[in-house]
Amino acid sequence: MDSTRIDTSVPHPARRYSYWLGGKDHFAADRASGDAIAAAFPAVVELARANRAFLRRAVRTVAEAGVRQFLDIGTGLPAPDNTHEVAQAVAPESRVVYVDNDPIVMMHAQALLVGDPRGRTNYIEADVRDPEAILRRPELRETLDLDRPVGLQLVALLHFVHDDEQVEGIVRTLVDALAPGSYVVLSHGTMDFSDAGGIAAYEQMFAAGGTDVRARTRATLERYLRGLDILEPGIVPVADWRPDDPAAPRPVSRDLGIYGLVARKP
């Protein structure tokens, strides 16, 4: 790995997310960006952790539905309950391909590639903005059989792509490549729960480059998922998606939210 490819002066979502989750792989720019966003939206750290817990529950749900292949785009840095760990706990033969565009994630990919020997894991360094290139990669085709159902994960990823039409094209290209019976696990930042003042503050911060998250509405996410069957309980805050303990207190925020959902391709 050529360390000169890593620009430590520019924050990267994967490293900032690691910082919020209590990880160690981040730089001053990532911490500064994370702290600035947390100062404006204090719930963001708790929501990041709730999003990680959503990933665990959603992958388990898809694996329990019989899916044995997973394509995790926007992997991020290794953390507890990586996709292969959750899926292989249900079915040891599960296969996982991880995709991310951060060279530091590539440096840590070996940790992501150690799974149950009855299954298989692989890693691709690529960008979701070019989904056709991801689908063409031999590492994907060697690991996953796209003629059989796949669990596609787009968790806390698409809000970093700011153009709505581009996001819709990404989702459509990836879903069209999957067999019937495949699933999409998606989470996405939203301001649907905020008041007018909070939305104005967010838009000002976004315009100034203080956050790289393009919040979207429930209606926009529904448009991206046309033709798919959204599982119960629908598009809900990540903490409310099939919680392990429904009676436990869950994070509630009026300044920022993350929707979570799982949808099935008929």
Image (cartoon, rainbow, N blue to C red):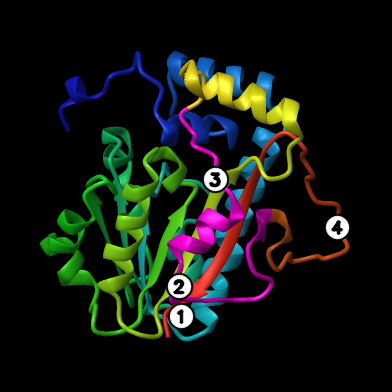
Q: Mark 2 vs mark 4: which is more N-terminal?
A: 2
Residue beneath disc 4 = 248
Which segment is the magenta one? 212-238
Location of residue 266 by image quarter: bottom left
Q: Residue at x 42, y 36 (%)?
A: 14
Q: Where is residue 123 shown, x and y percent of the image?
A: 25, 54
Q: Mark 3 vs mark 1: which is more N-terminal?
A: 1
Q: The residue under label 4 is which amino acid type?
A: Ala
Q: Mark 1 vs mark 4: which is more N-terminal?
A: 1
Residue 255, relative to residue 147: is it above or below?
Answer: above
Q: Nearer the viewer, mark 2 or mark 3?
A: 3
Residue beneath disc 3 = 216
Q: What label sits on residue 91 in the rendered view?
A: 1
Q: Nearer the viewer, mark 3 or mark 4?
A: 3
Residue beneath disc 2 = 88
Badge 1 element: loop
Q: Quote the CA–CA distance across marks 2 and 1.
A: 5 Å
